[in-house]
Amino acid sequence: MSTRAATCPRGLEGPRGVSMMGLVNLHDWIDELCDVLDIEAEVDEGLVLDLTKVVADNVARPAAPITAYLLGFAAGLEDANPEGVERLAARAQALAEGWDRPPGLPDPVDVDDDVPDDSTVDHTDDEFDD
């Protein structure tokens, strides 16, 4: 097994340990998925990804895919064109941005995860993989 495949996160290895990291083209996936689902759809993946990030950050991570699903469902019910989908997504995003967390629930962005403070460490000669 290659070094790259050995360090590949679980679930991202293809046949014979070949790394699938970086090999997925989102447009190809969308086209193939639409074929499998037997639908014709125009997808603004940037809009959906932006919306789900806001929902994950402001509501909860599991709410993000549910929000994307419901956005698609609403768009289908309204036979929405791209501008209509943008309006629906803007309404969902406004809801997420204004969502109040229950008292005492930590904000996932501000959770203290015991990351050491290395601000005084000189990283000038550190080498990083691309």
Image (cartoon, rainbow, N blue to C red):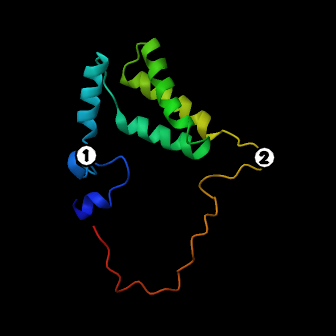
Q: Dot 1: what SS?
A: loop
Instruction: Tell me the number on the disc at residue 103.
Output: 2
Name the residue: 40% across, 24% down. 83
Residue 15 is situated, as x and y percent measured from the top left of the image, at: 22, 45
Instruction: Tell me the number on the disc at residue 14.
Output: 1
Name the residue: 47% across, 26% down. 69
Q: Is residue 121 above or below residue 112?
A: below
Residue 57 is situated, as x and y percent measured from the top left of the image, at: 57, 46
Q: Residues within 10 Å of mark 2 (few under 14, many from 20)?
A: few
Is 4 left, or right, of 80 in this rendering?
left
Q: Quadrant of residue 112?
A: bottom right
Q: Quadrant of residue 50?
A: top left
Name the residue: 24% across, 41% down. 25
Q: Amino acid at mark 2?
A: Pro
Q: Amino acid at mark 1?
A: Gly
Q: Which image quarter is the C terminus in? A: bottom left
Q: Is residue 32 above or below residue 75?
A: below
Residue 127 is situated, as x and y percent measured from the top left of the image, at: 31, 79
- The residue lying toward the viewer, choosing from 35 and 13, is 13
What is the distance, in whole Å, between disc 1 and disc 2 at their CAs?
44 Å
Q: Residues within 10 Å of mark 1 (few under 14, many from 20)?
A: few
Name the residue: 29% across, 26% down. 33
- The residue lying toward the viewer, choosing from 55 and 88, is 55
Q: Which image quarter is the N terminus in? A: bottom left
Q: Looking at the image, tell me whether mark 1 or mark 2 is earlier in sequence order.
A: 1
